[in-house]
Image: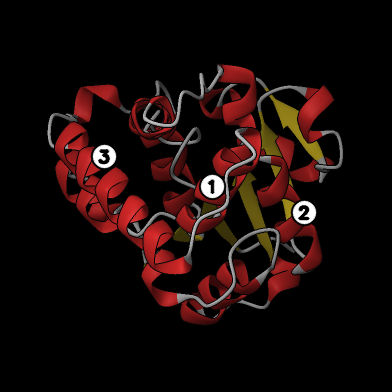
């Protein structure tokens, strides 16, 4: 029986992925790399350093670990500047209603985001009170598709992995959810998220009776 729901942040609750894309594209342009939206899909759900490595691979560029660290810090400083303009109105339609409905049915709710800035985003959105646990990139060693982040979330909720459902928009996130032994609702296209137990176009499209289909 599913007793807990775990939500990714980027692309599931709000489109912070857009802000990441702007920052990564700005950094890539310094190396004469034109980062396309399609290429940016590979960056979703993975760590900051892995995202940087993917971009450098696109340009066949090799740098020292020290140089890469400096670039990652610079990209993050741009991202932080961008997200300070985020407002609650940017939350996807239906998300708060869905979480509220789950809470009314006594589900435990967690946020599990690979972003190290997730706490700040949640503060700006004024929705921290909706979550019983928040796990972000500062709390884990391995990023998705490793299941660590979801296993930590279920542990903090006090609910076994098999009783949790994950809402994810990235292929790496879906793989992490499945590896953790959880059910997974993919938010996006079937082509990209076909391994999920159920796929919906938007988070707000999910209805509680769909839990019976998982």
Q: Earlier in the sequence, mark 3 or mark 2?
A: 3
Residue neighbourhood size for the residue with mark 3, other residues' Cα within 10 Å, grouped as few (<14), some (14–19), many (≥20): many
Of 95 and 101, nearer the camera is 95
Read off the residue under disc 1.
51
Of 200 and 56, nearer the camera is 56
Q: Secondary structure at mark 2?
A: helix
Of 9 and 41, nearer the camera is 41
Q: Secondary structure at mark 1?
A: helix
Left or right of residue 79, residue 146 in this image: right
Read off the residue under disc 3.
79
Query: Which quadrant of the structure image shows residue 177?
Result: bottom right
Label annotation for residue 175: 2
Left or right of residue 99, residue 127 in this image: left
x, y percent for residue 48: 46, 54
x, y percent for residue 31: 44, 31
Q: Residue at x 64, y 20 (%)?
A: 38
Name the front one of labels 1 and 2.
1
Q: Earlier in the sequence, mark 1 or mark 2?
A: 1
x, y percent for residue 69: 37, 62
Q: Residue at x 55, y 81 (%)?
A: 155
């Amino acid at each position: 029986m599913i007793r807990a729901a775990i939500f990714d942040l980027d692309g599931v609750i709000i489109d912070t992925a857009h802000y990441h894309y702007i920052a990564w594209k700005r950094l890539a342009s310094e190396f004469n790399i034109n980062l396309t939206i399609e290429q940016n899909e590979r960056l979703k759900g993975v760590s900051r350093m892995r995202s940087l490595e993917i971009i450098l691979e696109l340009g066949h560029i090799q740098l020292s670990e020290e140089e890469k660290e400096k670039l990652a810090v610079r990209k993050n400083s741009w991202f932080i500047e961008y997200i300070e303009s985020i407002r609650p109105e940017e939350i996807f339609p239906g998300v708060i209603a869905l979480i509220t409905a789950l809470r009314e049915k006594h589900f435990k709710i967690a946020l599990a985001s690979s972003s190290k800035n997730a706490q700040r985003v949640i503060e700006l959105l004024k929705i921290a009170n909706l979550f019983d646990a928040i796990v972000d990139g500062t709390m884990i060693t391995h990023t998705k598709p490793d299941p660590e982040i979801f296993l930590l979330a279920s542990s903090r909720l006090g609910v076994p992995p098999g009783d949790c459902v994950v809402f994810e928009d990235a292929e790496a996130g879906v793989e992490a959810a499945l590896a953790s032994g959880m059910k997974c609702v993919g938010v996006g296209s079937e082509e990209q998220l076909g391994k999920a137990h159920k796929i919906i176009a938007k988070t707000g499209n999910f209805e509680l009776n769909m839990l019976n289909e998982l």
